[in-house]
Amino acid sequence: MLYTFDSAARASETLAEHSDEQMMELVQREDSRGLEELYRRHSATLRAVIVRVLHNEHSSEDLLQEVFLEVWRLAGRYSPEKGKALGWMITLARRRAIDRLRREQAYFRVEERFQKETEQQPEAWTHTRVEEDIEAADIRHILEKILETLPPAQKYAVELAYYKGMSQREIASFTHIPLGTIKTRLELAVRKVRNSILTLGGASEWAPGQS
């Protein structure tokens, strides 16, 4: 065991003598020692780059791990002729951080717009107002995923309100369901929509909707 430890220590010292570009060559050959050495050298720098974009320590730490996985996966695209390895990694980290920030901001905009519509104008959820200032494809994709988690009755009520632009009274008349029941279903649906959007900020899966 002592021999193994000493051998590993000597190997680490040997790697420390080599450049970042040589470590990238190891990564390109799928030698994990290269990635480990790059992480040891530059994880603090890349974390700082990510934090400056996200302003969130927890999210930044998660994204840092993703960035190094990207370094491993995309190492073949790096060429020392185009610049230093550290510069390439910083650019990758900044781009991934910006992508994460834009995605989170899109979720928050959807939540704010959805909540504003239901709180300030609960009788008139119109498709055009909800989509204002938000790319149509983004909001449709997000809301469709959320609706799939709702119980059927709540999902149907939201679809009539959001996609058809019906008021609560119109939904009650159309479905022959008491107005109070429709209001309750929509209130529950809005609450679940909000919780789902908040969860989206750091979750990769969707939990089934609860009745």
Image (spheres, rainbow, N blue to C red):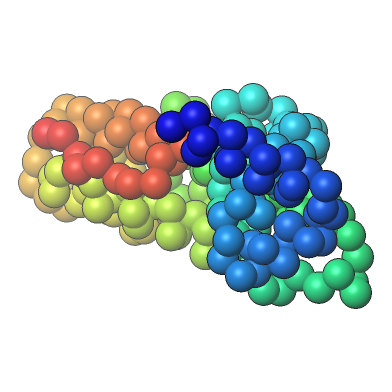
Q: Is residue 180 left or right of residue 19?
A: left
Rendered view: 4 above or below 138:
above
- Is 191 in front, or is 171? 191
The residue at the point 76 percent across, 54 percent down is 89
- Is 3 in front, or is 207? 3
Q: In the rendered image, which quarter is residue 203 located in?
A: top left
Rendered view: 47 above or below 161:
above
- Could you say where residue 153 lies in the image, as x and y percent from the top left? 13, 45
- Could you say where residue 184 lies in the image, as x and y percent from the top left? 20, 28
The residue at the point 51 percent across, 36 percent down is 3
Q: Which residue occupies the extreme front position in the image? A: 3
Q: In the rendered image, which quarter is residue 200 located in?
A: top left
Q: Is residue 143 left or right of residue 48?
A: left
Rendered view: 109 above or below 194:
below
The residue at the point 23 percent across, 46 percent down is 149
- Could you say where residue 208 lies in the image, as x and y percent from the top left? 19, 43
- Could you say where residue 7 lies in the image, as x and y percent from the top left? 58, 41
Q: Is residue 121 left or right of residue 15?
A: left
The residue at the point 53 percent across, 58 percent down is 138
Q: Quadrant of the C terminus?
A: top left
- Is 106 in front, or is 187? 106
Visible residue check, residue 210 = yes
